[in-house]
């Protein structure tokens, strides 16, 4: 009897009807380039929110060859919301990808093409125990200055071309790290290379930003001038995505009163940087429609800079200045940089005249969304731009690509 029961149980376990099944979702994605020019490292982003399966792992292939991909949980609910991968497209080219999503397993691992970090500042921690300082999220109340709590004063992230950091204070300025050669450096330098690293060709901070916009900080607007993000209930930074293909840093200002007498509003900003890119997308969401509010953004007026504007939301400059205050300039050299910002025209209220600090804009939105893009280049690069003319030509091409996205068609199998 026991032998018979064992046999029956074994047969049941081997039966196809009894075997556990794990739901999968397969789809075919076609990506088309509408431009008559080649494009590289084009992001392909697919929403997973309405799928019938909860995604745990993904496989992307083209012509049978595996393509690196990344799964991201954007809203911290433990479920992946987006899948992304990158591709190169020739002019007018169309490519087809096969995607298989499964609800078991872990995301596949691929070589890192980007890097992001937040670190607590603590001089008592030895270099060998530096990993004890890494964090992924910090929230502070109004009146707490986290600028001094965090190493390099806020989250820092990079592609192999460029690096950015976001000040964790009332300015929320976007500062930049320029490179000589393509590569990931911030884990080694933490934004502050020593003399030995500089001798080896590592990059460095290449811009003094102070209380300016830096490269695209979003502030309030009181009708005459930008206002800082001072009156907030809570301020936070969070690392949403660490790679291997993109980093996403979330900056949240909860209960922000842009000007006295206005109703508080909560603003969540995502800074998204893709592998192979020097530009960074800025995606802002408010907790309710922001009609009636106006904001300000732009780029710093680098000393001795020339300016470019197409008067339709694209603005840039090319100039040379110390990357720190002049009194602290020992050990540094003057840096030449090109900066750029592109704002969709529906958000532009006014393009402000240049002043000693900024090339600015007044912006607004008719709903709860606001999106724009920022970019920079360093004259130090052995792979980039070395004159105002070539930089401004690049900005025009950059805007053209942003405003002519690839066409993505998804067919579920």
Image (cartoon, grey):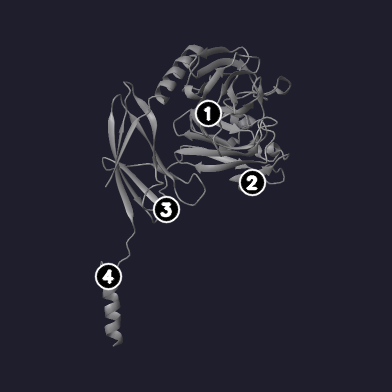
* C-beta proximity under 8 Å, tags 2 and 4: no
Choose mark 2 or mark 1, whichever is in front. Answer: 1
Return the x and y of residue 257 as percentages of the image width and height: 66, 34
Relative to 144, 112 lies left or right: left
Dot 3: within a 10 Å radius of its alpha carbon, few (fewer than 14), some, or many (20 or more) residues? few
Q: Closer to the N terminus: mark 1 or mark 4? A: 4
Q: Closer to the N terminus: mark 3 or mark 1? A: 3
Whether residue 124 is visible, yes or no, is: yes
Return the x and y of residue 76 as percentages of the image width and height: 52, 48
Return the x and y of residue 63 as percentages of the image width and height: 26, 40
Which of the two residues, 197 or 122, is positioned nearer the viewer here? Answer: 122
Choose mark 3 or mark 1, whichever is in front. Answer: 1
* C-beta proximity under 8 Å, tags 2 and 3: no
Residue 192 against residue 394 in the figure, above or below: below
Relative to 30, 401 lies left or right: right
Which of the two residues, 268 or 139, is positioned nearer the viewer here? Answer: 268
Return the x and y of residue 226 as percentages of the image width and height: 65, 24
Distance (Cα) linking label 3 and label 1: 39 Å
Total number of numbered discs in the rendering: 4
The residue under label 3 is 106
The residue under label 4 is 14
Dot 4: within a 10 Å radius of its alpha carbon, few (fewer than 14), some, or many (20 or more) residues? few
Distance (Cα) linking label 2 and label 1: 38 Å
Rendered image: mark on residue 365: 1
């Amino acid at each position: 009897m026991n032998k018979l029961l064992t046999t029956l149980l074994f047969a049941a376990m081997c039966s196809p009807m009894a075997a556990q099944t794990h739901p999968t979702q397969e789809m075919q994605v076609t990506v088309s380039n509408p431009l008559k020019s080649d494009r590289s490292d084009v992001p392909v982003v697919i929403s997973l929110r309405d799928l019938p399966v909860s995604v745990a792992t993904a496989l992307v292939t083209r012509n049978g060859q595996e393509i690196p991909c990344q799964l991201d949980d954007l809203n911290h609910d433990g479920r992946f919301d987006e899948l992304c991968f990158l591709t190169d497209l020739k002019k007018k080219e169309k490519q087809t990808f096969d995607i298989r999503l499964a609800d078991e397993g872990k995301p596949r691992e691929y070589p890192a093409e980007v890097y992001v970090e937040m670190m607590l500042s603590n001089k008592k921690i030895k270099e060998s125990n530096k990993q004890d300082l890494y964090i992924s999220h910090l929230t502070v109340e109004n009146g707490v200055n986290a600028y001094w709590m965090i190493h390099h004063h806020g989250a820092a992230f990079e592609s192999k071309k460029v690096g950015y950091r976001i000040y964790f204070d009332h300015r929320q300025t976007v500062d930049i790290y320029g490179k000589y050669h393509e590569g990931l450096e911030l884990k080694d330098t933490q934004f502050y290379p020593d003399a030995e690293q500089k001798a080896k060709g590592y990059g460095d901070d290449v811009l003094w930003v102070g209380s300016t916009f830096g490269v695209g900080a979003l502030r309030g607007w009181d009708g005459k001038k930008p206002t800082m993000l001072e009156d907030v209930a809570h301020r936070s930074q969070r690392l949403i995505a660490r790679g291997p293909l993109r980093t996403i840093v979330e900056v949240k200002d909860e209960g922000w009163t842009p000007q006295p007498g206005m109703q508080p509003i909560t603003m969540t900003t995502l800074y998204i940087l893709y592998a192979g890119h020097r530009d960074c997308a800025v995606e802002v969401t408010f907790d309710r429609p922001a009609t009636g509010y106006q904001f300000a953004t732009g780029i710093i007026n680098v000393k001795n800079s020339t300016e470019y504007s197409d008067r339709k939301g694209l603005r840039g400059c090319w100039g040379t200045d110390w990357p720190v205050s002049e009194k602290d300039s020992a050990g540094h050299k003057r840096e030449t940089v090109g900066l750029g910002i592109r704002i969709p025209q529906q958000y532009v209220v006014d393009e402000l005249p240049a002043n000693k600090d900024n090339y600015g804009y007044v912006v607004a939105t008719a709903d709860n969304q606001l999106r724009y893009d920022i970019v920079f280049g360093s004259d130090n690069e052995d792979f980039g731009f070395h004159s105002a003319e070539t930089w401004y030509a690049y900005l025009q091409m950059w805007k053209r690509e942003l405003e002519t996205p690839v066409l993505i068609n998804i067919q579920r199998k």
